[in-house]
Amino acid sequence: MTIAVRNPRTGANDYTIDPASPADLAALARRLRAAQPAWAARTPDERGAILRRWAEAIERHATTIAAALTDDTGRQTISRIEVAGVAQLVRRWADRAPALIAGHARRDQPTSQPTITTTTALIPYPLVGVISPWNFPLTLSLIDAVPALAAGCAVLVKPSEVTPRFVAPFTAATAEVPEIAEVLAFALGDGATGAALIEQVDFVCFTGSVPTGRKVGEAAARAFIPASLELGGKDPMIVLASADPERAAGIALRASVVNTGQACQSIERVYVARAIAAPFLDALVRQARAVRLNHPDIAEGDIGPFIFDRQANIVAAQIEDARSKGARVLSGGEIEEHGGGLYLRPTVIADATPEMAVMADETFGPVIPVAIFDDVDQAVALANSGVYGLSAAVVAGSIEEAETVGARLEVGAVSINDGSLTAMVWEAEKSSFRQSGLGPSRMGDSGLTRFFRRRVLIRQAGDALPLAAYAERAG
């Protein structure tokens, strides 16, 4: 059954995909598995050299890939950033993987037994499956796939059916590097395709919502394969009394509304000290009202349309819920239709309380609910409330003060005197706390090492123990 794809700027269904059937997926998996042993047999340096050629091919096709991403997402600058970032991602793992693999594959290691030594080999999972979301279609399709390839795995990617246009030009770029094309494939389709993919792979990586992530995790458990789950967030920002209100407002705005707030690391709730609450809100509202919609000219403006029209409905319902419970909407607040696209101006909500959906549920839109706290313990307790634990931010007059508070937050990463830094820094490992994820970090070195199993050879250089060594003896 053909799936129609909506253009987020026009609202028109102007693209279609034919979902891969279970038989199609099985055939793809067989092809990738057949090619994987030769890919894994290459040295890490040889794979690195091939990856660098792939990065060059991606850059040669950057214009067409970015154009397709622009149609997918309704944004232009971030689409170009995505393409450049993926080429950088490929080079990063091409450079890092050889030394990292050498450091973990250890020979002739002594043990507590004088005559016994060990050698550890890293064995890549043959086929890794990736199920990626619609908010950063290219980046989140490749953030797991690239290190898996560097490790020697083959990879099968199921991108979101909401944003599939980039696949054709990206596949054309990959075709210029046959060694990669043999071990990387994309399968188009919807949730049913993703579910079928899990049955074909040896390791699954998923990025998306908690409800869907739970289903993926359960399916992986039934298939008895490992899963890396990067799920939702409700990232808090704490603004301490020592912070500069104007600067803090600028950080909160940018970290909340970049990509129309459609990012898991977006700041989705702000707790500000009462002493600076008034000037902070004044600055935040003023800056929010100055933000321009990216319409009608895609080359102008600051904030684009919702990529997925259903998300606009979710955000609108959260805003209405906040209003009905006594919150004040100080800017934005209404979904606007322009040229068929759905837009929301940065929406600052004052007097937000914990029982409001906008403070408890993931929003995924350009909404900044603000609550006031009277002491730091209260702020930390509020920030640590809820089911998520992805990331957070603390803004203060000094890094030291911000770090003291940040160390108390139950999340995997804390931006200090900034916000959403996890979008810029990929070198440091971080865990997803609570329902924000499960499995090893895809950041830092574990982004690659998670794709290996370990095989140890245990050598006995002395005499093997006889059975008599275990004979029963009195006393």
Image (cartoon, rainbow, N blue to C red):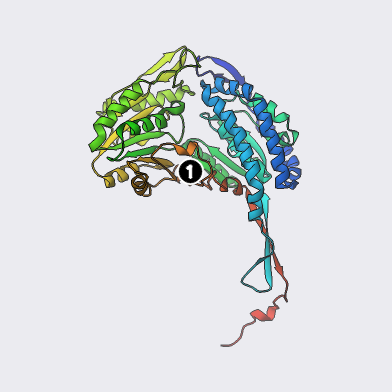
Task: Examine the rendered structure and indicate whether residue 65 appears above or below residue 209.
Answer: above
Left of 339 or right of it: where is 353? left
Q: Position of residue 447 (x, y in %)?
A: 57, 45
Residue 96 in the figure: left or right of residue 422: right
- Quarter of the image where one finds residue 147: top right
Residue 421 figure quarter: top left
Is 307 located above or below residue 156 in the figure? above
Q: Determine the residue positioned at 31% across, 35% down.
A: 244
Q: Residue at x 49, y 23 (%)?
A: 307
| Residue in the image at 74% along x and 36% along y | 179
**Image quadrant occupied by the C terminus:** bottom right
Say few, some or many: other residues with alpha carbon within 10 Å of mark 1 (under 14 / 14 to 19 / 20 or more). Answer: many
Camera-nearest residue between 465 and 332: 332
Residue 195 seen in this snapshot: no
Return the x and y of residue 369 as percentages of the image width and height.
32, 31
- Can I make out residue 189 in this image? yes
Name the residue at the bottom extreme: 475
Where does residue 15 sit, x and y in percent of width and height?
59, 18
Quarter holding the N terminus is: top right
Q: How many marks?
A: 1
**Mark 1 is on which residue type?**
Gly
- In percent of width and height, residue 53 lies at 70, 34
Q: Secondary structure at mark 1?
A: strand
Q: Which residue is mark 1?
A: 437
Q: Residue at x 65, y 82 (%)?
A: 471
Foreground residue among 369 and 76: 76
Q: Is residue 213 left or right of residue 367?
A: right
Q: Foreground residue, 106 or 12?
A: 106
Relative to 137, 259 lies left or right = left
